Image (spheres, rainbow, N blue to C red):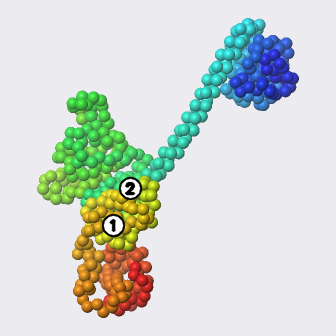
Amino acid sequence: MRYSAGMAAVEGARPTGDATSHTEYGILLVDDEEAILESLELTLGTGYRIFTATSAEEGLALLDREDIALVLSDQVMPGMSGVEFFEKVIERNPRAIRMMLTGYADMPALIRAINEGRIYRYIPKPWEPDDLRIAVKRGLEVYELSSENAQLADALAEANERLRAENVYLRREVEARYSFDGIIGDAPAMQKIFDVTEKVAQTDATVLLTGETGTGKDLLARAIHYSGSRKDKKFVAQNCGALPDTLLESELFGHKRGSFTGAHADKLGLFEVADGGTIFLDEIGETEPGMQVRLLRVLQDGEIRPLGSSDTRKVDVRVVAATNCDLKKMVEDGRFRQDLYYRLRVVEIELPPLRERSSDIPAMAHHFLDSSAAKMKRAFVGFSNAAMDRLVGYDWPGNVRELANEIERTAALAGPDETIGLDDLSEHVRGAVVGSGTALGNAAIALASALDAPIEDWDLNRSVDRLKRNMLIRAMREAGSKSGAAERLGIPRQSLQKMVKRLEITEADLEAPAESSPAGGGSSA
């Protein structure tokens, strides 16, 4: 066994010094005749790291230790033939280029080497030096190309795995974002909605979401999709009031090329895109009678027909629709098909306006503030009591969407303080007069009346606590529970519990008429 760099040879040694240049490929020569090995070394000349072995066993040992790019072996050797040797070479280094020395008369062995040893080329004996050098050069070019392809394949596999992991992460992130857990709502009205939607999410029933604009119908539709069995398929949404009837038909059902001016190619409709998944039809009450007929056919038969086509196509799509209109009144007025109305409202879920679940506002406001702070790379502790009171007392005609926009605007324009104060809120929110029908409105009226009455106790904290204590006792007596009292007062249940403890309100107080005596102590909440 011998290694040489160019003309030099070192018996039984590994390459050292300049011989280990990273630009040189390793070549293994295997032949049982020393003279042939020397002749091959002289023919190949310099530029390679050449290793020699006089038997297949020695060649395999070298192959285990060295980085070999090309193996040139004789076919006829004692012990192990060239074909058998190449079969073991493939097991150890499948990318190494394999070339065989053979005589023209040894054709059966040559055919076997091509079939089983998968040789790149055979070199006839005696060989032409130039032919040998060219064959080795071409073989190493193939090796270099295969090495680059292997690196690219590894990089592609790594990228695909990373992309798969990212897709899994994004899918889980989307599922978490649009799950019922991601929707803020502790008010009893929202808890009832969650109970219904969690059940309906596990079915394919058509759902109709109703409620004022901005109440979160889109978010609830996505939660229904991502909590059900179709979550791995597509969720697509279309605002039916955003397009005229013809364009909406093309958007939902697709069209054939040439079906109308500008239709230069076939187009898939959203029902086909969402096949196996869910389609969300927002503002369904804005559709024209012709579109209502086509939607009815999808709901009844699961069939669509693209514009300009005579063929129908089957689709398996779950439909979730939403509207801020009174569809029942529209049916009575003849502006909405009754049969479509009943097809859509297999399960109807009405989302309450934000003013009817004001106890959720503090949690929502903090959530939106955290989201805005993260986007703007700012830090906020929270809201002052005055600011939160005003947020809770405002009617929010735009509902959750308006609240989210208000908090984002406030975070963007707030001063360097870490707490959002009353002055940071929009003027229309800051200056809003609390409606007289709310609990806070009643408190404002009571406070205004108290200011006109003779003042018996000039201690502000005791007077405020006395008013709070009476309101809490009355609210809990009339509502029958702390949760109901908290919702009526427009405060979180946890805040009510803290005030009940601080103001020393007992069960006996809830059974007797509300007292007007000073509270047990402590500072104003």
Residue 81 versus residue 491: which sits nearer the camera? 491
Where residue 198 appears, as percent x and y from the top left, is: 39, 60
The N terminus lies in quadrant: top right
Q: Residue at x 38, y 73 (%)?
A: 385
- Label located before the other in sequence (2 or 1): 2
Q: Residue at x 17, y 46 (%)?
A: 289
The C terminus lies in quadrant: bottom left
Give the number of the disc on residue 423.
Answer: 1
Which quarter of the picture shows residue 444? bottom left
Say if residue 59 shows up in the picture.
yes
Answer with left or right where residue 136 lies relative to residue 358: right
Q: Residues within 10 Å of mark 2 (few under 14, many from 20)?
A: many
Which quarter of the picture shows residue 254? top left
Where residue 477 appears, as percent x and y from the top left, is: 33, 84
Say if residue 90 shows up in the picture.
no
Secondary structure type for disc 1? helix
Query: In 3D space, how far apart are the residues under numbered discs 2 and 1 (Cα atoms)?
Result: 36 Å
Q: Residue at x 24, y 35 (%)?
A: 307
Residue 391 versus residue 131: which sits nearer the camera? 391
Position of residue 134 relative to residue 175, above or below, is above
Answer with left or right where residue 373 lies relative to residue 306: right
Where residue 413 appears, as percent x and y from the top left, is: 36, 59
Q: Amino acid at mark 2?
A: Ala
- Residue identifier under label 2: 223
Q: Residue at x 35, y 55 (%)?
A: 219
Residue 214 versus residue 104: which sits nearer the camera? 214
Give the number of the disc on residue 120.
Answer: none
Q: Disc 2 vs disc 1: which is toward the camera?
A: 1
Q: Amino acid at mark 1?
A: Asp
Q: Residue furthest right?
A: 11
Position of residue 285 relative to residue 271, above or below, is below
